Image (cartoon, rainbow, N blue to C red):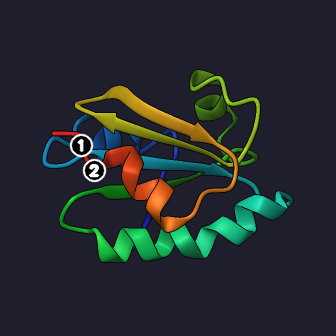
């Protein structure tokens, strides 16, 4: 499963109403060097762990309402939601193991 581009228009359907697995949101921007370096790692996680997590990408420049709603003040920001509730999050560049650790114990 590839990452899903999350927008204010599809947020409810793709994140809030998604009940099968947790959702990992990657808040990022094109001008953010750590975001660009972490992008392929997030894509790998999306593919490798598709049976355990749904991955969404939120471009903070294109989706300022979502960035504001999540109080994003530093990127990259990873947020894990389950049943629409934040269960974990991390700011800054992360490797695959760190990203997986964010959602591995979420039921």
Residue at (30, 29) in percent of width and height: 84
User: Where is residue 4 drawn, in percent x and y?
Assistant: 42, 62
**Rendered-image quadrant of the N terminus:** bottom left
Q: Quadrant of residue 3?
A: bottom left
User: Where is residue 100 drawn, in percent x and y?
Assistant: 38, 57
Up/down of 43 relative to 91, above or below? below
- Which residue is denoted by mark 1 in the rendering? 105
Closer to the camera in the image, 107 or 19: 107
Task: Report whether 73 appears left or right of 43.
Answer: right
Q: Quadrant of residue 16?
A: top left
User: Where is residue 51 drawn, in percent x and y?
Assistant: 18, 66
Residue 42 shows which numbered tag?
A: none
Residue 104 shows which numbered tag?
A: 2
- Residue 5 seen anywhere in this rendered image of the structure: no
Up/down of 33 relative to 71, above or below? below
Task: Report whether 41 appears left or right of 22.
Answer: right
- Tag 1 and tag 2, C-beta contact below 8 Å: yes
Task: Report whether 47 appears left or right of 99.
Answer: left
Up/down of 99 relative to 41, above or below? above
- Residue 39 seen anywhere in this rendered image of the structure: yes
Q: CA distance from mark 1 to mark 2?
A: 4 Å
Residue at (33, 47) in percent of width and height: 103
Residue at (65, 66) in percent of width and height: 38
Tag 2: Cα neighbours inside 10 Å, few (<14), some, or many (≥20)?
A: few
């Amino acid at each position: 499963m590839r990452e899903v581009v999350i927008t204010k228009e599809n947020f409810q359907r793709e994140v809030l109403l998604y009940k099968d697995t947790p959702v990992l949101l990657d808040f990022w921007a094109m001008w953010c060097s750590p975001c660009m370096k972490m992008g392929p790692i997030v894509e790998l996680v999306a593919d490798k762990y598709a049976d355990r997590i749904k991955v969404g990408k939120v471009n903070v420049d294109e989706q300022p309402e979502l960035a504001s709603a999540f109080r994003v003040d530093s990127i990259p920001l990873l947020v894990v939601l389950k049943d629409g509730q934040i269960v974990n999050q991390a700011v800054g560049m992360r490797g695959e193991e760190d990203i997986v650790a964010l959602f591995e114990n979420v039921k």
